[in-house]
Amino acid sequence: MSQNWSAPPPAGAAGNVPNNMVIAIIATVVSFIFCCLPHGLISLIYALQVNKKAAAGDMAGAAASAGSAKTWGMISIVVAVIWFILAIILQFAGILTMNLGR
């Protein structure tokens, strides 16, 4: 009886590239709560690709997806926070304008 044998993947090959899933999830939640922009979803999609590419042996593709996930996650969080701060400032300015106009 003969069985087909394939070499196991290198030890820790899929674990070498961080998938940045945590930042992608945080970015998705923050972007939907504060400004409803799709940047967080883009980060999440890239983060989901990292482990699949690493398991397939495409370490360069996994690293590129991990970098894109982190970049889009940071963009999403920064834009959401700026949008939230701007909304607070405009709301405060609107309240001041109403009170001064009386």
Image (spheres, rainbow, N blue to C red):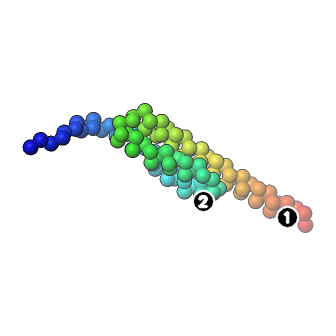
Q: Residue at x 85, y 60 (%)?
A: 97
The label on residue 99 is: 1
| Residue 18 visible | no
Three-letter amino acid code at disc 1? Asn
Specify whether 20 is left or right of 37: left
Q: Residue at x 9, y 43 (%)?
A: 1
Q: Position of residue 54 (x, y in %)?
A: 37, 39
Which residue corresponds to mark 2?
33
Q: Position of residue 25 (x, y in %)?
A: 49, 53
Three-letter amino acid code at disc 2? Ile
Q: Residue furthest bottom?
A: 102
Give how far apart the Cα atoms at labels 1 and 2 are: 29 Å
Which circle, 1 or 2, is nearer the viewer? 2
Specify whether 16 is left or right of 92: left
Q: Residue furthest top?
A: 60
Q: Residue furthest right?
A: 102
Q: Residue at x 67, y 49 (%)?
A: 82
Sequence-earlier tag: 1 or 2: 2
Nearer to me, 96 or 80 = 80
